[in-house]
Amino acid sequence: MIKILVIHGPNLNMLGSREPEVYGSDTLASIDASIAEMAKSKNVSLETFQSNLEGEIVDRIQQAAADQTQIIIINPAAFTHTSIAIRDAFLASSVPFIEVHMSNVHAREDFRKHSYLSDIASGVISGFGKNSYLLAFEAAVNQCNQSNS
């Protein structure tokens, strides 16, 4: 069975009320429920995790390698632009990952255009709101199926 971990970074627990003109009205719970529905329909093991703390995200990435997670979908949020620690955790764990952003980061402030993760990610999906996660889930399943065959 494919095992996927979804990590949501800082402030994503505020989705639905946080800048709805940028991030839409979907809550984190509704996004997780939509991904869980897709996972169930494809017989995929899914875990979701949210933290506002960089160290907790680093710990969870390291744990993913030990618990045989096959791929991670991560919306690192603000840590995208600041966290060498998260980058190093991915390099150390060797678990492939897909970087996700709900907004089009390239159409926003200049500082949001730089990612410490994009160059080591399997792919980046940005700008489709909640659907960024759903597209990433489809891509993750396809990548795992290709790796397993």
Image (tube, helix red, strand yellow):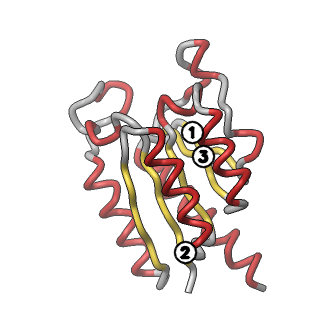
Q: CA distance from mark 1 to mark 3?
A: 8 Å
Q: Nearer the viewer, residue 109 or 10?
A: 10
Q: Which type of secondary structure does the marked residue at label 3 adopt?
A: strand
Q: Which type of secondary structure does the marked residue at label 2 adopt?
A: loop
Q: Residue at x 34, y 34 (%)?
A: 11
- In the picture, the disc for residue 126 is 1
Q: Which residue is the site of mark 3?
A: 99
Labels 3 and 2: the sequence-earlier one: 2
Measured along the vertical axis of the image, is residue 1 above or below residue 77? below
Q: Quadrant of residue 3?
A: bottom right
In this view, which residue lies farthest toward the left? 17
Q: Which numbered mark, 1 or 3, is in the foreground of this view?
A: 3
Q: CA distance from mark 3 to mark 2?
A: 20 Å
Q: Residue at x 60, y 76 (%)?
A: 68
Q: Residue at x 37, y 45 (%)?
A: 51
Q: Residues within 10 Å of mark 3 (few under 14, many from 20)?
A: many
Amino acid type, residue under disc 2 in the picture = Asp
Q: Which residue is the site of mark 2?
A: 67
Amino acid type, residue under disc 3 in the picture = Glu
Query: Where does the N terminus fall, quadrant-wise?
Result: bottom right
The answer to whether residue 123 is left or right of residue 104 is: right
Q: Residues within 10 Å of mark 2 (few under 14, many from 20)?
A: few
Q: Which type of secondary structure does the marked residue at label 1 adopt?
A: strand
Q: Are marks 1 and 2 in contact (CB under 8 Å)?
A: no
Query: Where does the C terminus fall, quadrant-wise?
Result: bottom right
Q: Are marks 1 and 3 in contact (CB under 8 Å)?
A: no
Labels 1 and 2: the sequence-earlier one: 2
Amino acid type, residue under disc 1 in the picture = Ser
Q: Nearer the viewer, residue 55 or 102?
A: 55
